[in-house]
Image (cartoon, helix red, strand yellow):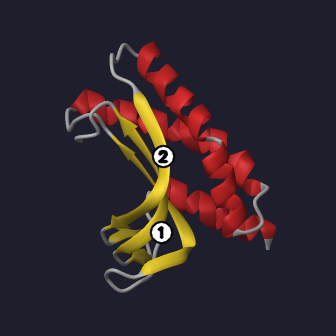
Amino acid sequence: MKKALAGLIILAIIAGAVYLLTPGEKNEDYIRIHIRANSNSEADQSIKLVVRDAVVNYLTPLLAQAETTEKAKKVLKANLKELENIARNILAENGFGYGAEAVFRMEAFPARSYGSLTLDKGFYDALIIALGSAAG
């Protein structure tokens, strides 16, 4: 059960979206993550993926210990500064002059499909990591 829950949470992080709702409905079973690139340029989109991978690597062992969605939320909220530091360090190491901000809040997400998993749009608790102006 514990590994299954951790797997679901990690899937949400990797996929960037997890929900099965009608429009406007809040889903409390899943947590989404969204890393917003500074812009739509190829370089900004590429570094976003590097940040995503580092965030997933950092969070995977922490979230594996979370037995419930509420515990996962607490882990994410407790690690916002560290997640910002991870993102900022990657940006600086790769010559990007902008920073990063991590927040945890309720946010609307569009519908998305990941292989055989289709997720409807709705409102979710989410970890948002904004890189630079987060316009991408």
Farthest residue, direction bottom:
22
Image vertical order of residue 94 relative to residue 106, above or below: above
Q: Relative to the observer, which residue lies in front, 48 or 129?
A: 129
**Residue type indicated by callout 1:** Val
Q: Residues within 10 Å of mark 1 (few under 14, many from 20)?
A: many
Residue visible at 32% across and 72% down? Answer: 111
Residue 93 pos. (x, y %): 46, 14
Give the mark nearer the N terminus: 2 vs 1: 1
**Rounded to the nearest whole Å, what is the CA distance between mark 2 and mark 1?**
18 Å
The residue that mark 2 highlights is 103
Residue 36 pos. (x, y %): 34, 43
The residue that mark 1 highlights is 18
Residue 68 as seen in the image, left or right of residue 56: right
Residue visible at 61% across and 33% down? Answer: 82
Residue 110 pos. (x, y %): 30, 68
Residue 37 pos. (x, y %): 31, 38
Residue visible at 47% across and 34% down? Answer: 51
Rendering quarter of residue 63: bottom right
Residue 30 as seen in the image, left or right of residue 4: left
